[in-house]
Image: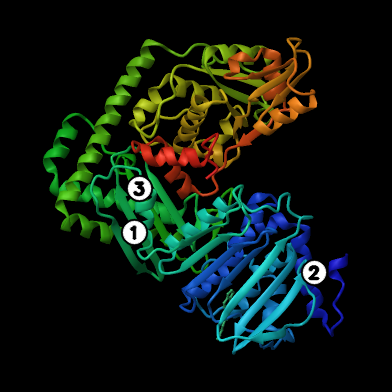
Amino acid sequence: MEETTAPSTNYGANSIQVLEGLEAVRKRPAMYIGDISEKGLHHLVYETVDNSIDEALAGYCTHIEVVIGEDNSITVTDNGRGIPVDMHPKEHKSALEVVMTVLHAGGKFDKGSYKVSGGLHGVGVSCVNALSKHMTSQVFRNGKIYQQEYEKGKPLYPVKEVGTTDKTGTRQQFWPDDTIFTTTIYKYETLANRMRELAFLNAGITITLTDLRPDEEGKTRNEVFFSKDGLREFVRYIDGNRNHLFDDVIYINTEKQGTPIEIAIMYNDGYSENIHSYVNNINTIEGGTHLMGFRAALTRSLKKYADDNCKRDLEKLEKNHIEITGDDFREGLTAVISIKVAEPQFEGQTKTKLGNSEVSGAVQQAVGEALTNYLEEHPAEAQKVVGKVILAATARVAARKARETVQRKSPLSGGGLPGKLADCSSKDPAESELFLVEGDSAGGSAKQGRNRKFQAILPLRGKILNVEKVMKHRVYESDAIRDIYTALGVSVGTKDDADALDTSRLRYHKIIIMTDADVDGSHIDTLIMTFFFRFMREVIEQGYLYIATPPLYAVSRGNNSKDITYCWTEQQRQQAIDNLGGSKNLKVQRYKGLGEMNAEQLWETTMNPENRTLRQVTIENAAAADYVFSMLMGDDVPPRREFIEKNAKYANIDA
Ligand code: 0RA
């Protein structure tokens, strides 16, 4: 292996191990940064920025600058102390070189502080180096500029002085290796979402993001992310498109049993629970012990307050045999939880579930104390929260009764699958696909055109509900949504406390939304995506949700439609016209809806796995997605219009 060849200097047995270390990263990159697609590519930036965040949290750095170069290189510069450059006693080389070339070298400089960020996998900047075709490190320290360059993680020369400076700090520039990554093109929005999140999570740090790649108009971009009030601002930002029960942010900033805990809470008049939790700046999308502690304290404190102060309301509930559940306490709750854990244990499918058992009690104690105080000191707000909880419980019980009546009247037929479903013959979820199709006529074409072995069609009955705007029971009672649940083979809304979705019961591992390629179609896409995001998020997280992309145009010669060129973009249309020799005798058809295609055309362009393009729905950043969905589906028209105009043809929710 090329990379294991020792450099020309005098290296001992130790350094051979070192080189093998980085070689391991290049051999199995996914083990270190998650994957080698777009996600892993962006992870390189987070890993690098995390080191600067650590320096800021240690109190030595206030500014972090991230620049996307015209060549898709990334430069991260901070004004911290600069990575030490003196000789490392054991390794016999500069400390900078050790940091850059030894796996997990970060720990060697641990000053007893929290190994705070260190990235999702905590792999350190040496992994970034190993996965870059070129990297340049510069350190500003002692009035001098030190520099070292690397190729695929191998130093090209020992650390050298290249100039003088009156600044201190670290500058890291890297060019991701295109023989490792499936793409090396950075997405501005993805980086912006993470930098915004980091600025909210770490109040007082200024993070700038600059994109030097000119857009269509030749313009570059630049944004400054800074939050003075941290989580208080974060929760206001996420909840900015909702109507609030009261204006206060309930804020907790404390330390319990050695665990720093910061929490911000707001109540809105909606029906969903939106809790975003972080451990060491990592989004714990699968939750864990900190979330359990939070929920337990919330339920307990509110219950206690209601018992002591709202006796008459509770008696009324009791008379009607209504019991309040944990869910009722969290309707309309938006919260951000950020804690720091010295030795976090991450579990779960995506390693984003906190396992440390001691954390649960610490968070529960912190939230219990703070919330109890808040409620005592703010009786008007407390009354509003309790009122909302009581309403939630009452509505839930009423809905259950209505549902039971409906179900008794019309028991499910046969195997319990929706009548409109044209199922596939395969029973293997891994190969089975479910098309959610808008409208009966398109549903008809899809049923005729499909491969019935592995493709099932579910025409959606009636309008899809805007789940942002209605109470939960309305969602469960909607025909279209019940059909989706039933077809998928899962049940939701039958128990009072909705459990996590059991994805092992899903009957299809591809759920494909297929709608018209127009504004109405993309609105329906958004409605269905919002439903999955709020009620079956696991489906998106596991990569099961897709959007079909029907063509926009068909270009053919005359009326003989044997030889048709399908086009998805304006450019392709122009190209097709040119290829077929100008516009003479050409027929250019603009597809306004799926219904305009016959079964064969629909199969060829949109359903056949050989030809079709599916867009996978992903949640890169849950807080950003929460914000976008509440904006798109909320009351406020101006921000929605602005977003849709900015995002052109489709309002894409790859937030
Ligand atoms: C350990 C010790 C010292 C600085 C750093 C790490 C450091 C690392 C990074 C990574 C990116 N930016 C950074 N800034 C600083 C300094 C110890 C001292 O000066 O006494």
Residue 18, relative to residue 387: is it above or below?
below
Q: Nearer the viewer, mark 1 or mark 2?
A: 1
The residue that mark 2 highlights is 20
At x 19% / y 50%, what residue is drawn? 381
Q: Position of residue 160 (x, y in %)?
A: 73, 85
Looking at the rendered structure, the secondary structure element under dot 3 is loop
Label located before the other in sequence (3 or 2): 2
Q: How many marks?
A: 3
Looking at the image, which is closer to me, 288 or 555? Answer: 555
CA separation in Å, label 3 and label 2: 50 Å
Q: Residues within 10 Å of mark 1 (few under 14, many from 20)?
A: many
Looking at the rendered structure, the secondary structure element under dot 2 is helix
The residue that mark 3 highlights is 240
Kind of residue at badge 1: Arg
Task: Specify the quadrant that holds the N terminus.
Answer: bottom right
The residue that mark 1 highlights is 232
Kind of residue at badge 3: Gly
CA separation in Å, label 3 and label 1: 12 Å
Residue 92, relative to residue 284: is it above or below?
below
Q: Can you tell which quarter of the image residue 12 is in?
A: bottom right
Looking at the image, which is closer to me, 588 or 391? Answer: 588
* Image quarter where ligand 1 lies: bottom right
Q: Can you tell which quarter of the image residue 443 is in?
A: top right
